[in-house]
Image (cartoon, rainbow, N blue to C red):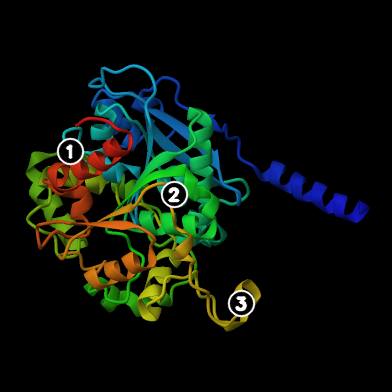
Amino acid sequence: MLLMELVIFFDWLLIVSGMPKVKFGLQNFTGRGKDYRIKVITGILIIDKYGYSVETHTVRTGDGYILDMFRIPSSPNCKEDGFKPSVLIQHGLISLADSFLVTGPRSGLPFMLADRCYDVWLSNSRGVRYSQRHIRLKASQDAFWRFSWHEMGMEDLPAMIDYILSTTNEEALHFVCHSQGCTTLLVLLSMKPEYNRMIKTANMMAPAVFMKHARNKLMKMFGNIIMSMKDSSFFGPLDAIRFLLSVFCKCSKFKKLCAFMFILASEEPTSYMNNTAIPLILATHPGAISTRQPKHFLQLRKSGKFRPYDFGVMRNKKLYNQDTPPDYPLENVRPQSPIHIYHSHGDDLVARKDIHILISKLDKAVLHDVVFEKWSHSDFLFAKLIKKVVNEPIIKVIDHFENRQQ
């Protein structure tokens, strides 16, 4: 017993001695973008620029990662007082909170929700530049990056949801996600079913869950290379590149070149792309990721299953008590209302066949077809038409749950 107490004491001592000086909870009391701890172009600056109230909140996950969330508690266009239902928006792979903000207040989902008098929270999952802190590890260490989206679902999401509900004194919130963001929610709700009661509505844009029929060319071209990479940061340091692009792309002379750069980095960009947002996209993206995240998706594509990370037979036996990872128990996924899925035939990452497989595994789901056949995976974030095609239908679902009139 004494030995156990000594072990616990020394573990605690190691954690405390290595812990950076981080204050948890509400950080930015002024609500001004320039007062945020990161001084280059950030989502906080974008929100503040358009005259919306903004806060940053810092939470700690059970495994020691320190995450910053952005909050838009009010809008200059909301004239209602009193209670505002919370909405948590979760980004996908190589994205971050900024991904939903770069198209501006007229068509950006967080601004539109705030205008409808919702309390808007934007997630920043572990690894992106706003969430590159840990109680013991540094982002420069490979050990920091030993995670996949499984850990985001098991650790990041519950930490953020618990914090939001505790802060707002609510029992449940609305959830909106894109791509990998939806993957993490299904991990959470299947593995920790007690969180189902905390989700009022789940709106999933292009959920990357079953991947067997993905047509993406980059996955096929670079899949073997990605699978051979060690567990580390996928991109390496990005801040210097972002800063140069933010300066370079503001100049009118270079906007066409910046658009060309974005096209080179994108998989078959469509005519729906909001070209005016490209300089801001290049200045804030990509969101940093671990090599394990795309490797995990490539495993799903190969297996045709939705299951945890495959570490190989020996480690699988220790973790899962079997040679291969078990399937996530999607039968446990039962939020308060049917899951709404938004999909397009033009999405080469999330195929229609895979969407139907997902729907067959869920208790209740409603499929929304995007009418534009060439609408791509990234168009859910950056298209000129997202206000009408995606965002207004999502807000309608949330309004209906809250018994609000359009």
Classed neighbour count for the residue bearing mark 1: other residues with Cα under 10 Å, few (<14), some (14–19), many (≥20): many
> What amino acid type should be assigned to the residue bearing mark 2?
Ser
Q: Which residue is mark 2?
A: 125
Q: Quadrant of residue 113?
A: top left
Mark 1 secondary-structure assignment? loop
Q: Which mark is residue 315?
A: 3
Q: Quadrant of residue 264?
A: bottom left
Q: Residue 243's x, y, as percent?
A: 29, 43
Q: Is residue 259 above or below residue 326?
A: above
Q: Which residue is mark 1?
A: 107
**Whole-Å distance between the Cαs marked 3 and 2?**
26 Å
Badge nearest the viewer, 1 or 2: 1
Mark 3 secondary-structure assignment? helix
> What amino acid type should be assigned to the residue bearing mark 3?
Arg
Mark found first going from the N terminus, 3 or 2: 2
Mark found first going from the N terminus, 1 or 3: 1
Q: Which mark is residue 119?
A: none
Q: Quadrant of residue 221?
A: bottom left
> What amino acid type should be assigned to the residue bearing mark 1?
Ser
Classed neighbour count for the residue bearing mark 2: other residues with Cα under 10 Å, few (<14), some (14–19), many (≥20): many
56 left or right of 287 in image = right
Q: Is residue 32 above or below residue 128?
A: above
Number of numbered discs: 3
